[in-house]
Amino acid sequence: MQEGSKGSTFGTVVKTVVVIGAIHAGLVALGRYMSNKAKELEKDNEGRKSKKYMSFMNGKDIRISREEVEEISIRSMMGGVNLDLTEAYIAEDMEIKIQSVMSGVSIKVPPMVRVRLEGTNIMGGFANMVPNYEKEGLPTIRIEADSVMGGIAVEMVPEA
């Protein structure tokens, strides 16, 4: 072993620990900032037919109950979102816009609605497991999704 190699190894370890600590602190600060932004964004949702949600490095459960909704916007990064519309009053034509990076978005809908899921997915998948109803006059949920390394799943929940 060369003289001084022990000191340089120790110095490398210290530098590595400092860099990891700085990255951790930066991610914590960014997470807090994004969480505050999400809360600020969502406080305007109350009583509106157009709703906006954001999830950053965490999970989010959204349940819309006994409220009419025409449009929902979801942005999710490195987390997951569960959207439950089973008790919502769905407008004749409802639109959901999703932007997802390294996240999954799961949507539950009531029976007797049409779901059209389209968009771009890179290194992930889309799954529309809602039956394709032929009956006229049913409300339609149009989902426009852009996802990178994530997935979008839509399923119908039967009435209890």
Image (cartoon, rainbow, N blue to C red):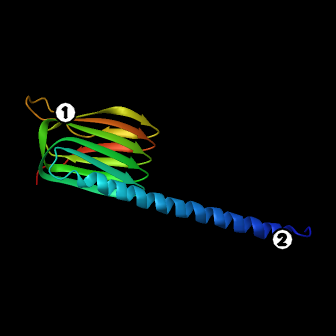
Disc number placed over residue 55 in the picture, else none: none
Q: Nearer the viewer, residue 42 or 157?
A: 42
Where does label 2 land, which residue? Answer: 6
Is residue 61 toward the left or the right of residue 91 in the image? right
Q: Is residue 112 visible?
A: no
| Kind of residue sitting beneath label 2 | Lys
- At x 59%, y 63%, the residue is 22
The part of the image, by quadrant, that contains residue 114 is top left
First reached walking from the N terminus: tag 1 or tag 2: 2
Q: Few, some or many C-alpha atoms within 10 Å of disc 1 (few <14, some 14-19, many ≥20)?
A: few
- The mark tally for this picture is 2
| Kind of residue sitting beneath label 1 | Asn
- At x 59%, y 66%, the residue is 21
Quadrant containing the C terminus in the rendered view: bottom left
Q: Few, some or many C-alpha atoms within 10 Å of disc 2 (few <14, some 14-19, many ≥20)?
A: few
Question: Mark 1: which secondary structure?
Answer: loop
Counting from the top left corner in percent of width and height, residue 80 is at 36, 53
Q: Is residue 49 visible?
A: yes
Counting from the top left corner in percent of width and height, residue 146 is at 38, 37
Whether residues under marks 1 and 2 lie with C-beta atoms below 8 angstroms apart, the answer is no
The nearer-to-camera label among 1 and 2 is 2
Quadrant containing the N terminus in the rendered view: bottom right
Counting from the top left corner in percent of width and height, residue 6 is at 83, 71
Counting from the top left corner in percent of width and height, residue 99 is at 37, 41
Question: Mark 2: which secondary structure?
Answer: helix
User: Considering only vertical position in the picture, is 136 above or below 98?
Assistant: above
Give the distance between the C-alpha atoms of the residues marked 1 and 2, in whole angstroms.
68 Å
- At x 57%, y 60%, the residue is 23
Q: Nearer the viewer, residue 152 or 15?
A: 15
Is residue 149 toward the left or the right of residue 45 in the image? right
Where does label 1 land, which residue? Answer: 132
